[in-house]
Image (cartoon, rainbow, N blue to C red):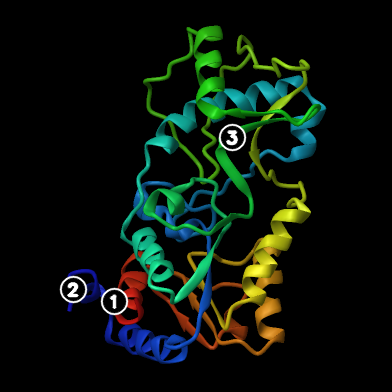
Amino acid sequence: MNTLASELSPEVLRGIDQAAELLVGRRFTVLTGAGVSTDSGIPDYRGEGAPKRTPMTFQQFLADDRYRKRYWAGSHLGYRRFAAARPNDGHRAIARLEASGASNGVITQNVDGLHKQAGSQRVVDLHGAMDRVLCLVCGQIFAREAITARIDAANPWLDTEGAVEIAPDGDAVVTDIDAFDVPDCTVCGGHLKPDVVFFGEFIPAEKYREASALVRSAEALVIAGSSLVVNSGIRLLEQARRRRLPIVIVNRGETKGDSRATVKLDAGTTETMVELARRLA
């Protein structure tokens, strides 16, 4: 038994046995949420011990220059730590499952890019990615590092070395925003925002179609580290349930999909996915 597996309870190990029996010989899709990245130092919105937080909505971001100052100042500070995060053993286990042919790919609600860094090849970034910036007027895409350099040059007073509290979307808590110079699009002068789905914003239709197609081509669904509070995850779970596919959920605490799971594992995603990959990959 490996070191991580030794941390699992006998009950969870029995659940992993059941999950492995269900999944062996079936090609499955993996749907991941913030819980997969907590062991990489990125916090979870809803996990045990997570502080209560109300993220900025898309409507607020559009409506008021002060909201944009607040968002970009916090996002800039948070992104430095966010971008320094590295894949953990759970990300690598998920990549091994795809490389072995057991999985047909990953749908992630995370915006951290860690699945791709870990080696996963087919990744649907359902909620976008923090390393891209989008112009809301002309649609131009910018590399985040280019925008980061512009913000540094325009806001030399900003304390980029200080301690910050980050969130799963890379945002950080900032109070002094009045002097912050918000970057705009160098093509058309329009508002820029990270290419991620804000609260109150719809997932791009083509992204959801891509995710749905992955589930449609699978013979089972594994959900790891998601409480399934966000509708996109529940819709994909329902797609699998309607086809009577085996559904395995790995998450600490309850999820909105527990009653529809074939196997529910109340455990950490890193050690559980490592052990599951050891048996299947």
What element does badge 3 sit on? strand
Q: Is residue 88 above or below residue 28?
A: above
The amino acid type found where label 2 is placed reads Asn
Residues under numbered marks 2 and 1 in contact, where contact means CB atoms less than 8 Å apart: yes
The spot of residue 167 in percent (x, y) is: 51, 42
Q: Crowdedness of circle 3 by 10 Å Cα count: few (<14), some, many (20+)?
A: some
Say which residue label 3 marks.
132
- Element type at mark 2: loop
Residue 175 visible in the shown view: no
Mark closest to the chain's N terminus, 2 or 1: 2
Q: x, y (%) of residue 186?
A: 69, 15
Disc 3 from disc 2: Cα separation: 38 Å
**Above or below: residue 19 compared with residue 53:** below
Residue annotated with mark 2: 2
Percent coordinates x, y for residue 32 in the rendering:
52, 63
Q: Which residue is mark 1?
A: 278
